[in-house]
Amino acid sequence: MILSHRECRNRMIIEWEEELEKNREFQRGDVNLARPTYVFDEKYIFEDDGIEFFHSPGHTVDSSSCYDQKDKVLFVGDNVESDIPYVNTLDFDIYISTLENYLARDWTHLVPGHDPVQTDDTLVRSNIEYLKNLEEWNVDLKSLTQKGIDVHLYTLSKLAPQVIQSGIQKKAKSQYIDAIEVLKKMEPNEKVTKYENLFRKILG
């Protein structure tokens, strides 16, 4: 049994060839698409084991989380990250709602995809705070660590086309101005130049 959210299965099918080509250098032997054999829309529960898989959009629209009701362990994947999360869409409210849902669950251990196991809700709450500030385009870059700045700049680059398409450049303008000032102080390279050119499109 291969279980996934319905949107995850759709993305696998649609993006398979592109992702395979993009990551060809990492392939070892034949690589074939193994599609999920069962999909769910909201949740899927293994009653006897006390295991619940549930849709938790945030890092991606198809993200799912897993809750072990018996051992009170919550697996959240890339939805919770230090110092701040990567954000790929303008659906801030949905992401925040997912993290608030985590806080409402009875867990003793939270397992992120790239960080140590968490035994309190500090990281979840700090991720929520960042998302709320990002939603208002009011992230204080001076309060971020270098790692946080790197993630924030990446996020702004991912959101830039959506900002332009949705016509909210004016609202987001100050955040991109601050980002450009940070970029000016960084060692010039291909990525810095790419970011700066992209961010200037927001400013018009």
Image (cartoon, rainbow, N blue to C red):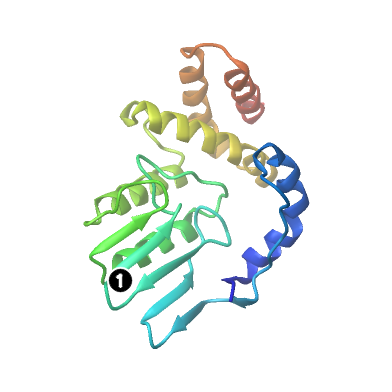
- Residue 36 lies, in percent from the top left, at 64, 70
Q: Nearer the viewer, residue 158 or 191?
A: 191
Q: In the rendered view of the protein, which quadrant contains the N terminus? A: bottom right
Q: What amino acid is found at the position of numbered circle 1 in the picture?
A: Arg
Q: Nearer the viewer, residue 197 or 7?
A: 7
Eyeballing the image, is 54 above or below 145?
A: below
Eyeballing the image, is 14 above or below 141?
A: below
Residue for point 75% across, 58% down: 14
Residues packed near mark 1 inside 10 Å, few (<14), some (14 to 19) or many (20 plus): few
Q: Quadrant of residue 74?
A: bottom left
- Residue 17 lies, in percent from the top left, at 77, 51
Q: In the rendered view of the protein, which quadrant contains the C terminus? A: top right
- Residue 194 lies, in percent from the top left, at 64, 23
Residue for point 39% across, 33% down: 148
Q: Nearer the viewer, residue 130 or 82?
A: 82
Residue for point 53% across, 61% down: 63
Report whether 35 appears left or right of 138.
Answer: right
- Please name the residue that numbered disc 1 is placed on: 105
Q: SS at mark 1?
A: loop
Report whether 136 appears left or right of 89.
Answer: left
Q: Quadrant of residue 192?
A: top right
Residue for point 70% across, 65% down: 10
Report whether 90 appears left or right of 23.
Answer: left
**How many numbered marks have been drawn onto this rendered protein structure?**
1
- Residue 120 lies, in percent from the top left, at 22, 56
Q: Nearer the viewer, residue 96 or 165?
A: 96
Eyeballing the image, is 134 above or below 191?
A: below
Toward the bottom, the furthest residue is 48
